[in-house]
Image: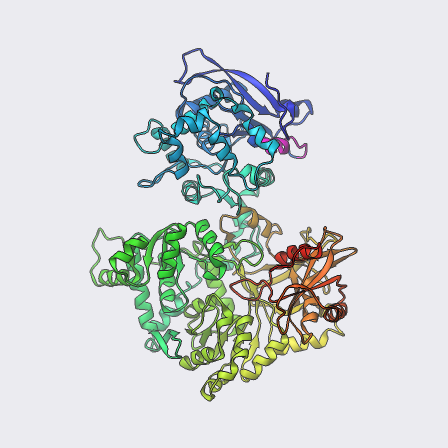
Amino acid sequence: MVNADWPDVDPEWSREIDVASTSAADEPGTMRRWHLLDNGAQLSHQGLTPAGTLLCVHGNPTWSYLWRTLLAAGSDPAHPWRVVAVDQLDMGFSERSGTFRRLADRINDLGDLTAALALGEQVVTVGHDWGGVISLGWALEHPQQLAGVVLTNTAVHQPAGSRIPASLRLALHPAVHRWGTTMSDAFLRVTHSLAHPPLGPDVRAAFMAPYRGADRRAGVGNFVADIPADPSHPSFPALSHVAEGLHGLRVPALMLWGPRDPIFSDRYLKDLIGRLPHAQVHRFEGAGHLLAEDRDIAAPLFEWLADLGRESAPDLQRMDARTGDPGPKEDAERPQRGTGIPPLWAPLIELAEGPDGGDTAVAEMAADGSVARSLSWRELEQNIADLAAGLQEVGVGHHSRVSLMIPPGVDLTVVLYACLRLGAVVVVADAGLGTRGLSRAVKGATPDVLIGIDKALAAASVLGWPGRRISVRELPSSRRRLLGVETSLAALARCGAGLSSEPPSQSQDPGPIDGPAPDAPAAVLFTSGSTGPAKGVLYTHRQLAAMRDTVAATLGVHPGSRLVAGFAPFALLGPALGAVSVTPAMDVTAPRTLTARALADAAAAIDATVVFASPAALRNVLATKGNLVRAGHDALGRVDLLLSAGAPVPESLLEEVQRLLPRASLHTPYGMTEALPVTDISLEQIRAAASDTATMAGAGNGVCVGRPVHGARVAVIPLAADGTAPGNHPVTEAGVTGEILVCAPHVKEAYDRLWLTLRESVRTPGWHRTGDVGHFDAAGRLWVEGRLAHVVTAPGAVVTPVGAEQAIERLDDVGLAAVVGVGPSGTQAVVAVVETVPHVRRAGPASPQLAGRVRDAARLAGVSVSAVLVVPSQPTDIRHNAKIDRTRLSRWASAVLAGGRPGKP
């Protein structure tokens, strides 16, 4: 009898059962004793009928204890599920058989056990590590009982030509294997060390409990020895059978993954997604191999199970904010979901084939103010066609993921549109995420191909980014070998040009004649990472085309417009809009490097009518305007439209910009990576809104971002007293502060491999929940008050930060201000952190004089500030140089106010 005295385990769950073995590893008639954690009897005693059974299978060297949170969740009367967590034979507290059990034996063993338990239908398998393979093997052999599969950090296939992970190679080495896995507990200790955060002493002891003594660890060593490292291994056929069988598995699937895993990395997740493309997938950034210890997997798993029990479950991902419809059943009634929408590149082709085909389409500037390179519409179209043919020849096609590591300009424009025409999915994660953020994004997206400049290819080599590598320029053979580069864009374009000049042979694949389907995936664009790890946002071709049409209809950017794009996304939209586009000489990863001279040179080069630049870029343009000559002033004076977005744009900044661009209409569209744009407002409308603050209901307290753009609807979910937005009923009443929701044809399709994040964003059917907070005024204008995650819950009040920050920033000696909460939710102190003008040398408490003025300014906005701190500079995101990391500031302020050394926030 096992003494079930383990943390977080109900002793009633522990049981043993004798099972007749039919395994080839045993003699006929052999009985084996299994240990389980099983809540079935407990549910029965309580009179509860489970919705189904979770069959949980651990890997090596854990045991059923790994699944204790699922047992607890399944025992909840609100959603009872029987949870059977097995200890495999020779593992945990099950019998030590004295035989070497291979993968096929273990799959068979599990079948023997479930037969003895008389498990009925509605079985959902849950597997981790090699338990994932074994659970899938059982699933394939028991289709009549199977209702779904759940996988965490496992693998079913080792790609040809690649080696198994280094840690497993070490464990298999003859000089290490027996000592490391059986004679000592080294393999266990190393595995337990993979938890993030580290396991507590009591939990670590529980995981060690079944394996104290070499005689208890034979199964650990045998499990390692049974890893099919190559096709000659005895278990390779069984593994291949499971891997191939997954292609025909049609039950619902959920994959929960810890990417910080040195064993089962994202490449194994990519392989599983290819075999189970219908699976819901969520990657928990920062979590690792022992995902069930690192994160709460019970809550998402049981949410997924609840979805399975609802008729609308298969439609969950369609309950998006593009149309307001809850699912695909009414697709025929959705006019915007028809097939008649012109592809993103339609205006480009029309211009290339028309009388203006010889005019400049795209250009990039040199540091000396000259045009470094340009292409006409006709040349751009030919270059795209040639490169598309070359890429197709080397295997890039429908659904291939292609990571683009190229600065905005001619090369990026050509390769982007070439990939889109092929039906490839472009992955755009810019250097503005920083090295860690960029690396995390690229590894998570698992591109098939990475196309980049030298610097990006070097980073890919050093940091282990996935994907075949293609250089922009042709490289010397030694450099190409060093970076692992297969070919170059120039070589592919020559190849493509040669293919297009040859008559097609019968054996030649003509490729996608009409281009990809409108609802096929087109791009994964990463958020700025200013509010947590950058998220990949998936767009279809239809949604990108809708974004183009929204920008054209709202802002009047159309064929004939000439655009200076100081913000990468708009540089790439230029050809789709039929607008001439030029990239100024600047570091696009640092917007504040745009100078007035560089902006004016770019404007003069194409006689620009439109400029797009972030607030940080505009600040530096104003700071360097003294370097402008008369020709530069004249070029900027001919601009008709200026667009600025990415962060709140103060009216005072726009007033200064207006003096530099006197003819331009200044607009500050509001949006996000998931939906751009959402609303729009001009400087004249901002002035009108400011004049209404004293007389109109709802006016004030935040940044006025105007009214919804063409085709969009906006609403809010009211905030509760705890600073959350728990409701599900959108409102548009004036003066009601809540989380901002948007519905539009150009809203994102999904978050890439972030099922939980997607689920949260679409939990109000028909809407995308933005995570921003704001309200409407009586004129129907939207005012943004900050992020939901940054709401401060002070005693008796919910404080949104932006209104008070704006009031503080009006002080002459304050640059950027941030309002954060310190302390427990509901009793937080409101703290103002300010960047002074001129900058202070050290961070810390503000002087009494400055603190008094800051408190007075905040009080005018209705906010009582408890403490004021100063910093030399605010921690902002790299991409926009404008979004303040308030979460980081809050942690820093808490430490400072607790008496810690100020240091750098």
Give the camera-side residue of 465 and 493: 465
Residue 736 image offset from top left, x and y in percent = 72, 61
Residue 470 image offset from top left, x and y in percent = 32, 57
- Residue 840: image quadrant is bottom right
The single residue placed furthest to the right in the displayed view is 796
Give the camera-side residue of 684 and 70: 70
Q: Which residues are magenta?
A: 68-78
Give the camera-side residue of 65 and 701: 65
The answer to whether 698 appears left or right of 143 in the picture is: right
Identify the residue shown where x is 40% and y is 12%. 27
Against 304, residue 582 (above or below) is below
Against 685, residue 442 (above or below) is above
Magenta stretch, overall SS: helix
Look at the image and tell me in which quarter the N terminus lies.
Answer: top right
The answer to whether 831 appears left or right of 768 in the picture is: right
- Residue 231: image quadrant is top left
Against 391, residue 165 (above or below) is above
Against 696, residue 341 (above or below) is above
Residue 530 image offset from top left, x and y in percent = 56, 59
Q: Is residue 711 visible?
A: yes
State yes or no: residue 102 in magenta: no
